[in-house]
Amino acid sequence: MKKRLFHSFTLLLAFFLTACSNNDNESLETSQQSQEDTSQQNQEYAEIGSGAHLVKFPDDLKEGIVFATYDRGDIHENIYVNSREAIEAVQNGEELPNGTVITLEGFRDGELEHYLVMEKRTGWGSQYSPEERTGEWEFQAFTPDEEVMEDGIGGPAIGRCYTCHANQERDQFMNSMEQMKEFDLGEISQSKNESIETAIEDIPADHWNVSEISAGLIDSKNKKESNLIEGQEKVDIIQDILLKMYLQQFKS
């Protein structure tokens, strides 16, 4: 009887140890497979910032729109966007269009220090992991001479731009979305008109002759009886004519 019980106990113990061994092996295999999957997944994604070379300095920067400015101590920043359509899209609750370029122009103590450019293109950013990707935006830093910045906030450190903007997914990865939403597009037309008027006012009028011709002499070849207009009145007439010519050409 004792021998039979001992034999049964031995079989039960052997079965238990075999089951534990199988479970341990399965757990080990599962853990190894998980590590292999994670390692393989990480290898599929590019290093953050590896696409920064795609971003070129915007040659038409000064033709863009300054929709926001920031002042912090001795730091001043102007934020440009390259198109009116981008602002209109944001104010209409739409996605920023392909080709949008946003540029931060940074000054310190009144001296230009750097440019930070973010550009959106269809398909950009697809090589990054979902956790690190900033939509279809790529970033690049440039020196005051408009060359790619290799150190400081540029070079290997450009990845910080991605990390910072990755937290702004709800604002299309922008840090200045509210300023763009609130920007008055009417200021653009007013500013352009003021610039045109200033340019016209700078045109010298000394070599211009403005004459007052009576209605009876308009069709006459003899216009010696016309009176020359001088002084500020002449200047005002010339500027008014030039402005009307420009506006007519603009409308056409």
Image: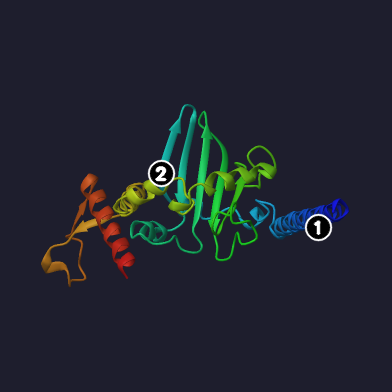
The residue drawn where x is 21% and y is 57% is: 211
Disc nearer the start of the sequence (1/2): 1
The residue drawn where x is 66% and y is 37% is: 152
Q: Which residue is mark 2?
A: 68
Quick check: 100 left or right of 247?
right
Between 221 and 115, the one nearer to me in the picture: 115
Relative image position of residue 118 (x, y in whole percent): 54, 52
The residue drawn where x is 28% and y is 55% is: 209
Between 57 and 40, the one nearer to me in the picture: 40
- Marks 1/2 in contact by CB < 8 Å: the verdict is no
Answer with the quarter of the image where residue 251 lies.
Answer: bottom left
Tell me the SS state at disc 1: helix
Between 192 and 216, the one nearer to me in the picture: 192
The residue drawn where x is 27% and y is 54% is: 238
Relative height, residue 89 to residue 232 (above, below): below
Q: Which residue is mark 1?
A: 15
Relative image position of residue 173 (x, y in whole percent): 49, 51
From the image, state whether disc 1 or disc 2 is nearer to you: 1
- Residue type at numbered disc 2: Ala
Relative image position of residue 46 (x, y in whole percent): 69, 56
